[in-house]
Structures are given as structure tokens and as C-alpha cells.
Image: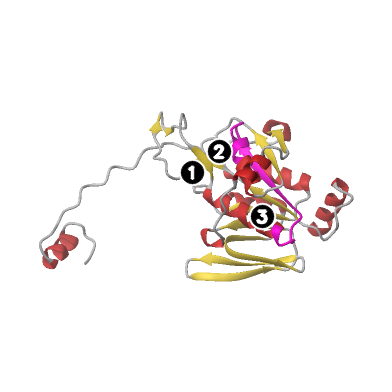
């Protein structure tokens, strides 16, 4: 039923689009750059004058979506981002990597769990997926700011779609996908016989490409639609309250021991690390 509905929706939006064509929607999140040391002020992470960049796991999702298009498995890749007007820069990065167009759900609410939380993000993505008639949604397994890893599973639940999390490899054939996913004990292979589906991407899935200068220039001309979050008619209030935000305590200085016996003694009697 889900497959028939999404194909009908796609045909209404683009009558020339074949029933076998696949539209991939990929989430791109704007986060504090992974190399930046964050500062805590007024019980929150200070975002003023700090370098922001595309979430590394979202970058992997973008790369995989572009590879599907290059393999002729997908005919369009749409990048979607939620956040302030600066998110347009994040979308342009995805467009420079090979996405065809972008959708910016604009809001001034913070997306690092302080204000907008995963359930709200999933609701926003649900609206876009239903409007676009997407057959496959690729997301990073988590954002490096909140580390929740919940948006993908919640989106799949809202849509009623199958999901595969922590993807380490992905292949598409015969209208379905086969995904090798990371587990605590190794990997397992999951097959989704028929799309649609939601997939979250892990580190081993691929190595993202660097955007070339010509593609960066082309990205400036690609279409980016802007939607006000409040126009979607959703309750975006947080479900959880953040009580306190604080920096971890500084690490104590290490010591040098004279021999193995001294090391074992300190591990046993001071650190309590061994019985």
C-alpha cells in the first residue's frame, strides 16, 4: 500500500517520471564542526562566532545518495535541512557534492536538542517525504551535537516504513535494497524486498568526496525551496527538558611508575581497576 501511494504521488508531481524511477531524500544537519572545542555558557553550548559544518554522518548519507544516482538507481537526490537561514550553506555543500536540489525548513529554534528534538525533526521530515513522494530516505545515524540517533527510527515509525539503521554497505536491485548493518558483535545483512524505506548511515558505508570548484559554482544555481516550519502546522515543543549543561572536568595529570609491580599496585589499590 505504501509503495502504491508513493508512486501515485510521484506521478502527480511529475507526469513524465517513470514508475520505476526512485527519488532519494537525504537529511543534512548543520552542527558545530567536529574539530572545534565547544564552550558552555549560561547552561547551554555557546554557538556565537563558532565554526559550523555539515554533520559527518549526514555527509556519508549524501555521498551514498549521489552514488545511487550515478549508478542510475535513483533519478533525483533531494537534500533537506532544518534550521536557521545559515542552513542554506549546508544545503549548498550537499548540492556541490552532487544533490540535485534542496529543501530548507527554516526555523530559529536550536536543533541540538535544546529546543528542536528528534521527534519534532522526524515530524518535519515526514511532511516533506509525503509531499515529495520519496521512495528512499537516507539519514546520518546521529548528529554529533546531540548524539541521539533517534530521528531515523522515529521517521520510519511515523511513515509506517521499514528501516535499517547503522548501514555499513548498501545495494539496490529489483525495487528493493540490501543493507549490511553494524552491530555490537559484528555485522548483519538486512533485505528490504520493496521500497519505500528509511536507512541511517554509519562510518564504514563510504568515504565522502570533496566538492570540486566547478561543482561548488554549479551548486549556487541549483534550486533550494524554503519552507517556514510554523507553516507545517506541527507541535514542535520539546518532549524533554534539559536540566543542566556542563563541561567535563579536566583530566588529572598522569604519573610515571618505576616498574610493573608499582603499576599493578596502583591499579589495584588506588584506581581499583583490577581485583
Residue for point 78% across, 50% down:
133
Q: Which residue is mark 1?
A: 145
Circle 1/circle 2 CB separation < 8 Å? yes
Q: Is residue 120 visible?
A: no
First reached walking from the N terminus: tag 2 or tag 3: 3
Circle 3/circle 1 CB separation < 8 Å? no
Q: Is residue 198 above or below residue 119?
A: below
Q: Residue furthest front?
A: 214
First reached walking from the N terminus: tag 1 or tag 2: 2
Q: Tell me where the magenta segment starts and ends, as one range.
A: 70-91
Dot 2 falls on a residue whose secondary structure is loop
Q: Which residue is mark 2?
A: 111
Marks 2 and 3 sit apart, C-alpha to C-alpha, by 25 Å
Dot 1 falls on a residue whose secondary structure is loop
Q: Which residue is mark 3?
A: 66
- Answer with left or right where residue 115 lies relative to residue 221: left
Mark in the foreground, 2 or 3: 3
- Is residue 76 located in the magenta-colored stretch of the structure? yes
Q: Residues within 10 Å of mark 1 (few under 14, many from 20)?
A: some
Q: Position of residue 128 (x, y in %)?
A: 73, 44
Q: Residue furthest left?
A: 258
Q: Residues within 10 Å of mark 3 (few under 14, many from 20)?
A: many
Q: Is residue 116 above or below residue 183?
A: above
Marks 1 and 2 sit apart, C-alpha to C-alpha, by 9 Å
Q: Quadrant of the N terminus?
A: bottom right
Residue for point 11% across, 63% down:
262
Amino acid at each position: 500500500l505504501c509503495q502504491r501511494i508513493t508512486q501515485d504521488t510521484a506521478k502527480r508531481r511529475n507526469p513524465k517520471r517513470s514508475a520505476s524511477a526512485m527519488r532519494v531524500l537525504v537529511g543534512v544537519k548543520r552542527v558545530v564542526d567536529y574539530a572545534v572545542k565547544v564552550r558552555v555558557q549560561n547552561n547551554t553550548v555557546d554557538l556565537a562566532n563558532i565554526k559550523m559544518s555539515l554533520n559527518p554522518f549526514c555527509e556519508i548519507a549524501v555521498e551514498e545518495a549521489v552514488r545511487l544516482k550515478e549508478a542510475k538507481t535513483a533519478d533525483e537526490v533531494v537534500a533537506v535541512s532544518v534550521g536557521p537561514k545559515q542552513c542554506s550553506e549546508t544545503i549548498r555543500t550537499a548540492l556541490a557534492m552532487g544533490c540535485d536540489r534542496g529543501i530548507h525548513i527554516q526555523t530559529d529554534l536550536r536543533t541540538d536538542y535544546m529546543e528542536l528534538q528528534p521527534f519534532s525533526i522526524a515530524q518535519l521530515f515526514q511532511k516533506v517525504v509525503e509531499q515529495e513522494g520519496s521512495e528512499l530516505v537516507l539519514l546520518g545515524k546521529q548528529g554529533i551535537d546531540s548524539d541521539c540517533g533517534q530521528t531515523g527510527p522515529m521517521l520510519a515509525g511515523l511513515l509506517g516504513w521499514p528501516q535499517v539503521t547503522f548501514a555499513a554497505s548498501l545495494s539496490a536491485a529489483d525495487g528493493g535494497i540490501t543493507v549490511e548493518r553494524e552491530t555490537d558483535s559484528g555485522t548483519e545483512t538486512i533485505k528490504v524486498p520493496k521500497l519505500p524505506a528509511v536507512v541511517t548511515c554509519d562510518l564504514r558505508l563510504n568515504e565522502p568526496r570533496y566538492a570540486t570548484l566547478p561543482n561548488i559554482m554549479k551548486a549556487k544555481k541549483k534550486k533550494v525551496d524554503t519552507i517556514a516550519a510554523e507553516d507545517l502546522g506541527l507541535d514542535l515543543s520539546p518532549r524533554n527538558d534539559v536540566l543542566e549543561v556542563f563541561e567535563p572536568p579536566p583530566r588529572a595529570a598522569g604519573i610515571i611508575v618505576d616498574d610493573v609491580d608499582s603499576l599493578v599496585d596502583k591499579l589495584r589499590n588506588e584506581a581499583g581497576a583490577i581485583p
